[in-house]
Amino acid sequence: MPDAAPAVRGVYKPRRPQASPLFRLVSDHLHRLQTVYDERFAREYGPWRPVVAQVADKFLACGVLEHGFARMRCDDCAHEYLLAFSCKCRYFCPSCHAKRLAIWTQWLDTTLLAPVPHRQVVLTIPKRLRAYCLYRRRLLGEIARAAVRTVTAAIRTLTGERDLAVGIVACLQTHGSRANWHPHLHLLVTDGGFRPDGTFVSWPVHDTARLTEAFRRAVLRLFVRLALFDEDQAAGMLTWPHSGFHVHTAVWVPEDDRAFATRLARYCARNPIALERLTYDRAAKAVTYRSDKSEGPTAGTETADPLEFLARVLVHIPDQGHVTTRYYGWYANRPRGTRDKAALAAADGPGPPAIAPAPRLAPTEATRRWAALLQQIFEVDPLACPTCHGAMRIVAFITQASVIDQILTHLRTRASREAHAGPRSPPSTRAPASRGTARAPCPSAHAPPVT
Ligand SMILES: [Zn+2]
Ligand SMILES: [Zn+2]
């Protein structure tokens, strides 16, 4: 055997991402879905998009050693294991989306969010308008801008201060509690605004009825401007007694409760599908999905046809380059950059009044926080040696098909010999599918140890 393989010694314990119900659902039905989509699902879920097949293919390779891995090694005790590559797909792969969320919320906590109270503002649009977002995927972003202008105007008007800068993080969410198509917005808003000198002024009164009405008018005006509605249709919708527009502002976050703020942010940008609420019965050809609501019309568990459910879940994959999290006002990139520069320039004088710049982390402290972060997501620290707790490092990225096969075959043969000698079950022998290109290693929980 060539040099690369025998150097990796040890036990082979596959992570088996193939056991997840979502993996099995996609691998069983993706191909068939593509052939019947136009006829059966295009009407309800919009046209088939090439990005969907790309993401689904990457997901089927995520965490699967046959598609490549990094060799991790501990220099202290020579312990090694293989770390499979991850797909890095957002709003579909539960593992990769969770990793993104954890990194993002840590950045919110340490860098973005100002030390002031925040408020979650959830804005929903009527059913009739939701279908437009299927055919014009960027429409929800345009609705977000209308929502941001409405909320900012409300705060400026109520405080009587026209030049307040309101900080807003807008999360575009397309799914409801049952992974259904339900485009809506979650805004994390400073509960007030900043004067040009940095002083924070609180949002004095909350009136959701008036805010809802303002949002309704802003969205209908947008639909007219985009020629999706004519003036008469918009005027007609303004007369509906139940408008179908809703704005909730009840969730308030105190300035010192960062744990709550980041938990809330995670909820605002959560994955459309949660594995713990999904079951897939291959024999019965049935999917069941439990709502994340315990009461109300969308509560309970639903049984669906696998093809229908897959079409429903795939519709939430964003188009390539579509920005689903946006920053406005005080939190927009440009004012943030200006503030950072001002803070640096005034390093020996007084800093900006209300906002302290994010602390500069020493490399060791940054490493410690990263390790803590990874541990929080995956319950193991992929950078710590499971044997001696020393620091693991990446020895090599293995992406060449022939080398992958040699190493895995070697490890399987060895594991199989050991299985005959002891109680350990034999390793997975699933045939490798097409090779992916080189990707970053997935620091996932069950990386197979190689001792
Ligand atoms: Zn993934
Ligand atoms: Zn070690």
Image: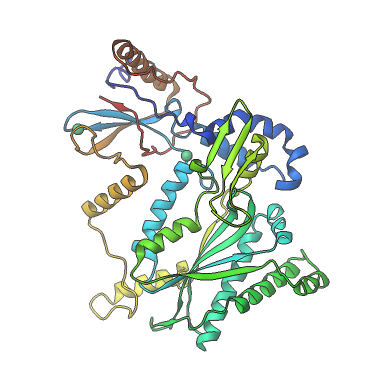
Q: In the current view of this chain or complex, which residue is farthest to the bottom?
A: 160
In the displayed structure, does residue 69 sit left or right of residue 390?
A: right
Q: Nearer the viewer, residue 365 or 237?
A: 237
In the displayed structure, does residue 195 sit left or right of residue 243?
A: left
Considering only vertical position in the picture, is 410 above or below 392?
above
Q: Residue at x 62, y 70 (%)?
A: 146
Q: In the current view of this chain or complex, which residue is farthest to the left?
A: 76
Q: Residue at x 78, y 75 (%)?
A: 239
* Position of residue 432 measured from the top left corner of the image (x, y, whole percent): 49, 22
| Camera sees residue 139 | yes
On-image quarter of the N terminus: top left
* Position of residue 39 measured from the top left corner of the image (x, y, whole percent): 78, 38
* Position of residue 142 measured from the top left corner of the image (x, y, whole percent): 63, 64
Considering only vertical position in the picture, is 39 above or below 245?
above
Q: Nearer the viewer, residue 243 or 231?
A: 243
| Camera sees residue 162 | no
Q: Residue at x 31, y 66 (%)?
A: 358
* Position of residue 349 measured from the top left corner of the image (x, y, whole percent): 25, 80
Q: Nearer the viewer, residue 175 or 404?
A: 175
In the displayed structure, does residue 174 sit left or right of residue 196?
A: right
Q: Nearer the viewer, residue 364 or 378?
A: 378
In the displayed structure, does residue 48 sit left or right of residue 196?
A: right
Considering only vertical position in the picture, is 103 above or below 11?
below
Number of callouts: 0
Considering only vertical position in the picture, is 95 above or below 247?
above
The picture quadrant where one finds residue 84 is: top left
The picture quadrant where one finds residue 78 is: top left
On-image quarter of the C terminus: top left
Q: Residue at x 48, y 29 (%)?
A: 19
The picture quadrant where one finds residue 424 is: top left
